[in-house]
Amino acid sequence: MLTKLSVSGFKSLDDVTVHFGPFTCIAGQNGAGKSNLFDVILFLSDLTRMPIMDAARRVRDRSEKPGGPIASIFTRTRDGMRDTMAIAAEFIVPGSVVDDFNQRAEPSVALLRYELELRFTPTDEVESERILLVKEALRYIPKSEFRGALFPTSGMFWDSVKGGTKTSPFISTSEDKDSIFVHQDGNGKSGRPERFSALGARRTVLSTISSVDRPTAFAARREMESWVLLQLEPSALRKEDEFSTPSDVKVSPTGAHMPATLRRLGADGLIASRLSELLPDVGELSVDIDERRQTKTLVMTNKDGISFPAKALSDGTLRFLALAIMHADRDAGGVICLEEPENGIHPSRVSAMTRLLRDMAVDPQEAVGDDNPLRQVIINTHSPLVVQSLRTADLVVCGSYRQDGATYTDFSFVAETWRAALMPDHHPTSLGTLVAYLSKPEEADWSQSETVRQRLETQLTLPLREIAH
């Protein structure tokens, strides 16, 4: 679970810090840099599985101009570009972890900070452009320090998060930055650290830790691997599953494998009830088994008894259904990022979508467990209707500014919320500024803009003190 992210030198993110709750909405106009925040989260995730250059290409290819220079992922300035980037992520890892050999272990601590510094090297006579590892570190954050920089939680939640102590780092970089060390989990000096050369390294050291022999570092890797961007594609959402689909399959980031996952969960009634918040006419959900074709097909039946296979359902309905299945799946954990969840949803049903997304996230007032998995949801939007349906404590406002001939992204929050308490030196966004943003005519059909503005002012002003903490 990602709780804090600090970034410098990545695309338009130059010296920004964002605190995340279980559910966070990044709200801002198109072009402000909302997607860049998702890009850096996914970049960290990709770095746990692949070489640095491959992860950088994935960032580049998600942009509006895929296939451009790798240097495009570094911050641009009027005079050129930054040649280094620094990223620091603070997160909570689960209490146990399983490796590819089905070996289970428990990390010695669960509250961690991962730091990374990369440098861009342009093409020379020997090699083409490349990105090299400069610094890497993974260390424990004391529980008291971590809680002091966290969203509001109950004692039950906090007690269920593993504490422990660790005076030395799990991964460290030498002062001369020519070596990176992976240390033993224990605080004692038994066991020499494993040394890696940092000179010319093409991948992170964390990506090389592949077993529970180093349980805490491996747990950090597994946690970051679980950070995904949902790109729910209509073709994948409508696709049948074959009999050969593994029995433990989960809904994929594209929305594939809904039939097999629904059948595994056996929660048809629960998920149908959730879908009825979007479509009141829903009667039941089922999985049709075709023995001849050896396929599994998701079927929705309405209250009149008329059945519709997935291929006959709308894109918006299928997106909602995929999320509802993920919500019911306790194994679908990690950080889930989703862009513009309002797409394909009728305006009158936007609040149903945001309720579902908020309910998918871990409840910070309950203990973490099978019924309350450590799952986090981060969305972005430029829709006034989405923002209107949310609590102010869940909002991070994304804006942009010009400085020295370049455009940068900035993130702020609403006054008197928990983020404002954590960052007293950072100027918060006023309610009036947020309302003004939502009232811009180019953002939507504003035939009723005054009504929306008045409703938003009421929603934001009245419950603010109740929900800020």
Image: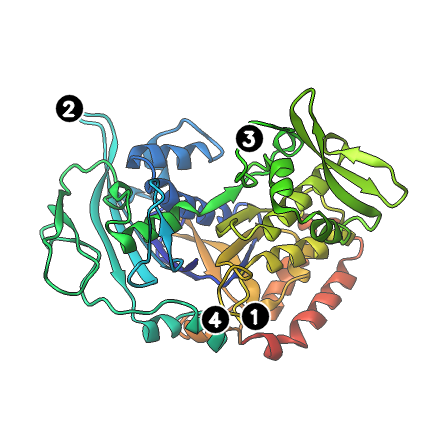
Residue at 35% across / 40% down in the picture?
Answer: 100
Q: Are marks 3 and 2 in contact (CB under 8 Å)?
A: no
Q: Please state the horizontal and vertical placement of residue 460, each as a whole percent of the image.
A: 65, 71
Judged left or right of residue 25, residue 307 is right
Mark 1 vs mark 4, foreground winner is 4
Q: Are marks 2 and 4 in contact (CB under 8 Å)?
A: no
The N terminus is located in which quarter?
Answer: bottom left
Judged left or right of residue 421, residue 371 is right
Judged left or right of residue 280, residue 204 is left
Judged left or right of residue 277, residue 57 is left
**Disc 4 target residue:** 157
Inter-mark Cα distance, 3 to 4: 36 Å
SS of the residue under disc 1: loop
**Disc 2 target residue:** 126
Whichever of callouts 2 and 4 sits on the residue coming sooner in the sequence is: 2
Which label is found at residue 245? 3
**Disc 1 target residue:** 430
Identity, as a three-letter code, of the amino acid under mark 2: Val
Visible in this render: residue 453?
A: yes
Q: Nearer the viewer, residue 387 or 203?
A: 203
SS of the residue under disc 3: loop
Whichever of callouts 2 and 1 sits on the residue coming sooner in the sequence is: 2
